[in-house]
Amino acid sequence: MARESDVTLVKASGPLVSSARRRLFAWWQTEARDLPWRFGRTSPWGVLVSEVMSQQTQMSRVVPYWTAWMEVWPDAAALAGATPAEVIVAWGRLGYPRRALRLQACARAVTEQYQDHLPDDYESLLALPGIGDYTASAVMSFAYNRRIAVIDTNIRRVLSRAFQGVESLGGATSPADRRLANSLLPQDRGDGFGSELETQPPSVKWNQAVMELGATVCTAKNPLCEDCPLAETCLFLAAGRPGLGEKHTRPRQSFTGTNRQVRGKILDALRRQEGSLTRAQAEALWEDQIQLDLCIASLDEDGLIEMAADGSLSLPR
C-alpha cells in the first residue's frame, strides 16, 4: 500500500474528478437522507446542535433527540437559561454526556458575546466552548454556505479510496488529508442544481454528498461498491480494494464492563429517580464498588453530578 507521503494529489479540474462529481451530485439529489436539519430547514444554531449530537453517534439515533431538543431550546438563549440537570436529562442515552454541558457552555457564550446569533466566521466559531475544527467547518459550510473543506472520518475514507486508491487508516486528520480535501473542493460557481438543492453552492453540495456516501455506502468494513455512484471512477475499487478495513487505531473496546457503562448506569438512574439517588441506591447499581466509586468521582469531576456529604448523588443544579 502507498504511504501517505507518497500519494499524489489529483487535479480538481481533471476528467476523473469531473466525472465523479457529476455522478455523486446526481446520487445525492435522489438518495440524500431527509434529515430535519438539512436543506435550509433549520437555523445555524440548529445545524450546530445536530453536529454536536452526531459526534460518535449514528444519525438514526440523533433525529428524535434533536427534534425534541429544538422544540424545547430552539436557540442559544433558550438553552443558556436551562439548568444543567435539565440538559443532562434531555441528552438521554445519546452517550458522551459531557457534550451536553459543553453545548450549553457554547450557548451561553453565543448569548453573551453575540446576542444569540451564532457567528458566521471560522475563527469566532472555533473560539466557542467545545467547538473544534470539524464542527466550525461544518457550520460554515452547511449553515452559512461558505466554501470550506469539511473533513470527518467518512469524508477522509471516500476521498482516500476514490481519488488516491488507498485505504484511509484512521487516526487524526493529517496535513495530507487536508491538502486532498482542499484540492477536490469545487469552486462556487453555477453548476446545474436541481429542485430543493438549488440554493446550495457546489462546495456545500460536495461536502454533504461525500459525507453521506461515506456514511451509507462507502463504509469502513463492508462498502457497498455495487451501489456506489463512484464505482466506475473509483481508484480503490479498480485496484482490488487493497487493505480494506485496515486501521492505525486500536480495536474499539467492548462496552460491557467499562467505566463508560457504569457512568451511563449512574446517569440513567438519576434521570429515572428525578435527579437524586441515596448512597444505598447508588451502591446497588454496580457490584464492583471500587469501580463504582471511581466512576462517581469522574462524573463529579466532569460536572455531570453533585455529591453530598452523606454520599447521596444528584444532577447539577
Image (cartoon, rainbow, N blue to C red):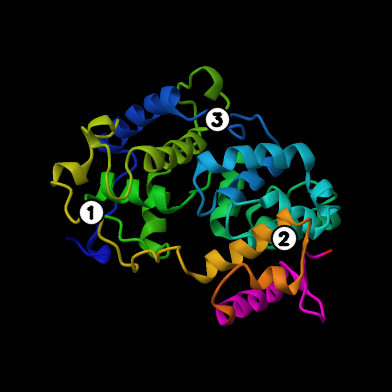
Task: Report the residue at 35% width, 61% height from top.
Answer: 170
Q: Residues within 10 Å of mark 2 (few under 14, many from 20)?
A: many
Task: Report the residue at 81% width, 57% height from top.
Answer: 108
In space, the residues marked 1 and 2 are separated at their CA atoms by: 47 Å
Labels 3, 1: front one? 1
- Does residue 144 appear anywhere in the picture? no
Q: Position of residue 314 (x, y in %)?
A: 78, 66
Mark 1 or 2, nearer chain start: 1
Q: Quadrant of residue 273?
A: bottom right
Q: Position of residue 73 (x, y in %)?
A: 78, 43
- At mark 3, the secondary structure is loop
Residue 270: mark: 2
Q: Determine whether 289 is above or below 60 in the image.
A: below
Labels 1, 2: front one? 2
Q: Residues within 10 Å of mark 3 (few under 14, many from 20)?
A: many
Mark 3 or 1, nearer chain start: 1
- At mark 1, the secondary structure is loop
Mark 3 or 2, nearer chain start: 3
Q: Position of residue 87 (x, y in %)?
A: 75, 54
Q: Quadrant of residue 272?
A: bottom right
In the rendered image, which quarter contains the N terminus? bottom left
Q: Which residues are magenta?
A: 290-316
The residue at the far top in this view is 195
Q: Which residue is mark 1?
A: 166
Left or right of residue 35: residue 151: left
- At mark 2, the secondary structure is helix
Q: Position of residue 120 (x, y in %)?
A: 69, 47
